Amino acid sequence: MATQTHTKYKEEADTCTTTESYCTLIVWNDEVNTFDWVIETLVDVCGHSAEQAEQCAVIIDAKGKYAVKEGSYEILKPQCDAITERGIGATIEIMAN
């Protein structure tokens, strides 16, 4: 019986750890949006410098996607929404521990 209680506690701890995990904001490449639009979006939405946004855009184009920002889900979710509202593909992924 004690083992089951311990197991249940461990599951609860794992769930708590997952909700506190850091996430990444992924921007996806497409054939529609221009480099300039992606750069402008990263500057406006993510607070990147022009140089940083340009480097991200080059990597997105070359690799198909790139993690442009890291942080908590609560911080990244509005930024992800703002990017997708501009017609650019973006998702949030939980970082592996």
Image: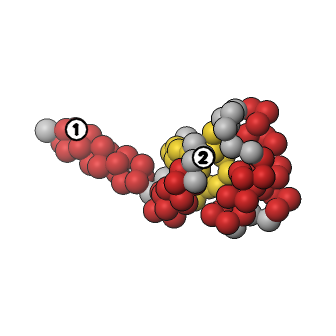
Residue 50 sits above or below residue 13 on the image = below
Q: How crowded is mark 1: few (under 14 residues within 10 Å), some or many (20 or more)?
A: few
In-front residue for pair 96/27: 27
* Left or right of 87, for residue 30: right
In-front residue for pair 63/12: 63
- Disc 2 to disc 1, how far (Cα)? 49 Å
Q: How crowded is mark 2: few (under 14 residues within 10 Å), some or many (20 or more)?
A: many
Q: Which residue is drawn at 82% across and 52% down?
A: 54
Looking at the rendered structure, which numbered label has been put on residue 88?
Answer: 2
Residue type, label 2: Ile
Q: Is mark 1 on a helix, strand or loop?
A: helix
Q: Residue at x 36, y 54 (%)?
A: 16
Looking at the rendered structure, which numbered label has been put on residue 33?
Answer: none
* Marks 2 and 1, the one that precedes in the sequence: 1
User: As drawn, which residue projects farthest toward the right?
Assistant: 51
Residue type, label 1: Thr
* Left or right of 93, for residue 8: left
Residue 61 seen: yes
* Left or right of 71, for residue 50: right
The C terminus lies in quadrant: top right
Percent position of residue 30, x then y: 66, 35
Percent position of residue 14, x then y: 37, 46
Looking at the rendered structure, which numbered label has been put on residue 3?
Answer: 1
The N terminus lies in quadrant: top left
Q: Residue at x 67, y 66 (%)?
A: 44
Residue 47 sits above or below residue 36 on the image = below
